[in-house]
Image (tube, coloured by chain):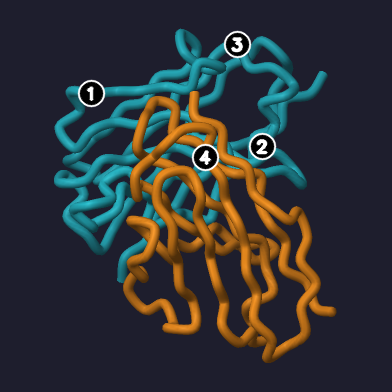
Amino acid sequence: QVQMVESGGGVVQPGESLRLSCAASGFNFSTYGMHWVRQAPGKGLEWVAYIRYDGNRKEYADSVKGRFTISRDDSKSTVHLQMTSLTTDETALYYCAKGSKYSSAWYAFDIWGQGTMVTVSS
Amino acid sequence: EIVMTQSPATLSVSPGERATLSCRASQSISNNLAWYQQKPGQAPRLLIYSASSRATGIPDRFSGSGSGTEFTLTISSLQSEDFAVYYCQQYNNWPPLTFGGGTKVEIK
């Protein structure tokens, strides 16, 4: 079945780096854009980053631009998020999400992973 | 950046009753709006896309309407499994993709 499994979360100190991964299965990964969305504890959803199906377009939230890098490895159906210079307010559950299959809504998210927790604390 | 505003923040509804949730965009987004449901400890689930189209497997008690800046999610007869937080998201003008702050639907 269609699923996505995130990994790589953990506890880091402010200023440190972390690399998240999301392994997808059950769909033709190489034909879909992929996103990262985060959710701070008890808070709402915040879009973080996007990579187009071919890897040739990447977009970021202003809050992470220049510090986060999204990438994909279609041979492994995996998307990554390299995060540097982390701050305490970036403590959140990080979800990977698949761009939707609906042609009128490529930039909605139709499949989500269960998330990986990132805690930034001194 | 397009700001999405949801109201009310919390909606208290009895099972079997109708729930109406609102989402407003700070500028016109045509019909490029999605709705998601999130239950405690779970990832969000896509309910509605293009403002009014139900995603695969979504019961027909969920319906969406609106265009431009005003949107509504209606749950016609609330079931126990529908008590959750609901988010709207615009994808008309991005980056960034933006979400509303959420409406919690709780049992009255």
Chain at tag 2? A
In front here: A90 or B44? B44
What x and y, as percent, mark residue B85?
66, 61
Chain at tag 4? B
Between disc 1 and disc 4, the foreground one is 4
What x and y, as percent, mark residue A11?
70, 31
The residues bearing labels 3 and 2 have C-alpha atoms spaced at a distance of: 15 Å
Q: What residue type is disc 3 on?
A: Ser
What x and y, as percent, mark residue A25?
28, 58
In the picture, the quarter occupied by the C terminus of chain A is top right
Question: Where B32 sits versus B28, above or below?
Answer: below
The disc placed on residue A92 is: 2
Q: Which residue appears at 51% of the width and 20% of the height?
A: A83
In the picture, the quarter occupied by the N terminus of chain A is bottom left
Q: Residue at label 1? A: A57
The residues bearing labels 3 and 4 have C-alpha atoms spaced at a distance of: 32 Å
- SS under mark 1: loop
N-term-proximal mark, 1 vs 3: 1
Q: What residue type is disc 4 on?
A: Ala
Label 3 Cα neighbours within 10 Å, binned few <14 / some 14-19 / many ≥20: some
The disc placed on residue A85 is: 3
The residues bearing labels 1 and 2 have C-alpha atoms spaced at a distance of: 25 Å
Q: Residue at label 4? A: B25
Question: Where A97 sits versus B3, above or below?
Answer: below
